[in-house]
Image (cartoon, rainbow, N blue to C red):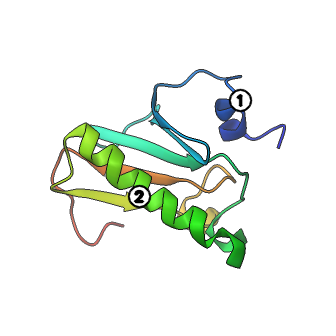
């Protein structure tokens, strides 16, 4: 998608603070962090959101979860972190490209919002 900010980050057209990458996903620091550790985990494949995923995306979704665990370990927050995805505008999704927020480094409250 030519106008997708995450696709532009993946293509290195927009700089980011990359913390992880492989053939299926990248992870980079959020520009407006909501916690001491706030990383976005994004599939290289453009998918608008979780609702747009199909049966063929099951392996990708599992991979993103494993990437989150690896990034949390590397960041030193494996003992406690939150992984969040928003789906749709009413849930707070501001970029129409599936992504997960990995948050940690502080106590998390419940309910979240």
Name the quadrant containing residue 59.
bottom right
User: Quick check: can you spot residue 25?
Assistant: yes
List the residue tagged with mark 1.
Answer: 11
- The answer to which of 95 and 78 lies nearer the viewer is 78
Q: x%, y% of residue 5?
A: 69, 37
User: Quick check: can you spot residue 54?
Assistant: no
User: Closer to the observer: label 1 or label 2?
Assistant: 2
- The answer to which of 95 and 11 lies nearer the viewer is 11
Residue at the location (49% across, 47% down)? 41
CA separation in Å, label 1 and label 2: 23 Å
Name the quadrant containing residue 66.
bottom left
List the residue tagged with mark 2.
Answer: 66
Residue at the location (69% across, 54% down)? 96
SS assignment at label 1: loop
Q: Earlier in the sequence, mark 1 or mark 2?
A: 1
Q: Is residue 33 left or right of residue 35?
A: right
Q: Quadrant of the N terminus?
A: top right
- The answer to which of 58 and 113 lies nearer the viewer is 58
- Marks 1/2 in contact by CB < 8 Å: the verdict is no
Can you say whether 32 is above or below 69 in the image? above
At label 1, counting other C-alpha atoms closer than 10 Å, the crowd grade (few under 14, some 14-19, many 20 or more) is: few
Q: x%, y% of residue 24?
A: 61, 48
Q: How many marks?
A: 2
Q: x%, y% of residue 94?
A: 61, 51
Q: Quadrant of the C terminus?
A: bottom left
- The answer to which of 24 and 90 lies nearer the viewer is 24
Q: x%, y% of residue 48?
A: 72, 59
């Amino acid at each position: 998608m030519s106008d997708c900010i995450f696709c532009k980050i993946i293509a290195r057209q927009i700089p980011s603070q990359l913390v992880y990458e492989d053939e299926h996903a990248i992870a980079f620091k959020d520009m407006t962090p909501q916690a001491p550790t706030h990383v976005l985990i994004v599939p290289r494949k453009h998918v608008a959101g979780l609702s747009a995923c199909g049966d063929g995306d099951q392996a990708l979704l599992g991979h993103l979860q494993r990437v989150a665990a690896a990034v949390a370990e590397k960041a030193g927050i494996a003992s406690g972190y939150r992984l969040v995805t928003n789906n749709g505008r009413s849930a707070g999704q501001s970029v129409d490209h599936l992504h997960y927020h990995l948050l940690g480094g502080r106590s998390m409250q419940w309910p979240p919002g």
